[in-house]
Image: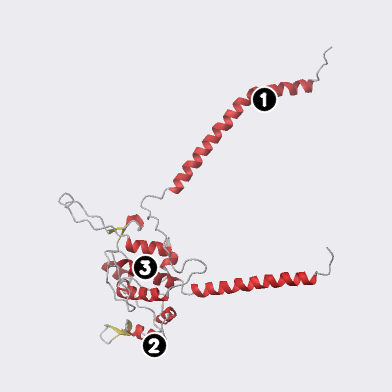
Amino acid sequence: MKARMSFAARSLAVGRRGNVRRLPQVVAGVLVCSFVLAGQGALTASAQAAPPSGAPAHAPAQNWSFNGPLGHFDLGAVQRGYAVFAGVCASCHSLTQVHFSDLGDMGLTPEQVAALAASWQVAAGRDAEGHLKHRKATPDDALPRPYADPDAARAANRGAVPPDLSRITQVYPGGPDRVYALLTGYAPVKPPTAEAGAAQPEAGFANPYAIGHRTAMPPPLRDHAVMYADGTQPTAQQEARDVTAFLAWISNPHADDKRRLGVGVGLYLCFLACLLVILKRRIWSHVAK
């Protein structure tokens, strides 16, 4: 005699049989949703990975002496970079946040800083006829601007205003690597051909590390553009490395002091930790384990 099942047991058995019948449909739905979500994730990742049109190329990493927590600035390279800036870059770019006295931290004596400042001319008001007067700079003066105002800068540079370089490696995406890549990454200038003679030439100069792959700045460096006092061969690549090191130092002149302070603090904390371990063992040495 078969045992009768209660209404609840029969309902549960029917529900289980129905769930088993619907299981393939549920599994298929889950797989379809998974594939859809995976496809959307792949599309999103590829869209994020692909750089927007006209974005600057990624600058190759350079081996800078000031990289890393234990890095330091090569002051010889910084001084050579100043020579490149003063001889080439200062005709268009400014360092408005830098005073001549700040340059003493790159290894110069006060006498050398005063002589360096005296080689520059700064504005000293106007004479009785309204003409601008100039005088020799002193260590307390800021480095002078090459142009009186942005309008004068635009007029001299075909509508472009050269940026101030006081903090360029801190605010410029890519930092020193991209500055160096921009200085050395100009494409060769192609001579005009007969077919392209009637076409309108593109504005600026081709450079894959510039926004839009073109820049209003012509190639600034060339071999022997400056003379180095220490006898280093002034190739265009060497000048680019040196001026990049100078701009990195100007952007963060106290980086070496911060690194030294960080190393000192780390050593002090290690010593303090060892002392506390010894003290703890001494205090609790009489307590039985």
Residue type, mark 3 in image: Arg
Location of mark 2 (residue):
111
Tell me what residue is drawn at x 34 percent, y 68 percent. Answer: 238
Q: Nearer the viewer, residue 107 or 173?
A: 107
In space, the residues marked 1 and 3 are separated at their CA atoms by: 71 Å
Instruction: Give the answer, above or below, for where 198 lies relative to 99.
Output: above
Location of mark 1 (residue):
19
Point out the frontmost of discs 2 and 1.
2
Quadrant location, the C terminus: bottom right
In space, the residues marked 3 and 2 are separated at their CA atoms by: 27 Å
Residue type, mark 1 in image: Asn
What percent of the width, then of the height, locates residue 264?
A: 58, 74
Question: Judging from the image, what secondary structure is the residue with disc 3 in?
Answer: helix
The colour scheme used to paint the residues is: secondary structure
- In this picture, residue 225 sits left or right of residue 49: left
Instruction: Give the answer, above or below, for where 217 lies relative to 116.
Output: above
> In the picture, residue 165 is in which quadrant?
bottom left
Count numbered badges in the picture. Answer: 3
Point out the frontmost of discs 1 and 3.
3
Instruction: Looking at the image, tell me whether mark 3 or mark 2 is earlier in sequence order.
Output: 2
Q: Residues within 10 Å of mark 1 (few under 14, many from 20)?
A: few
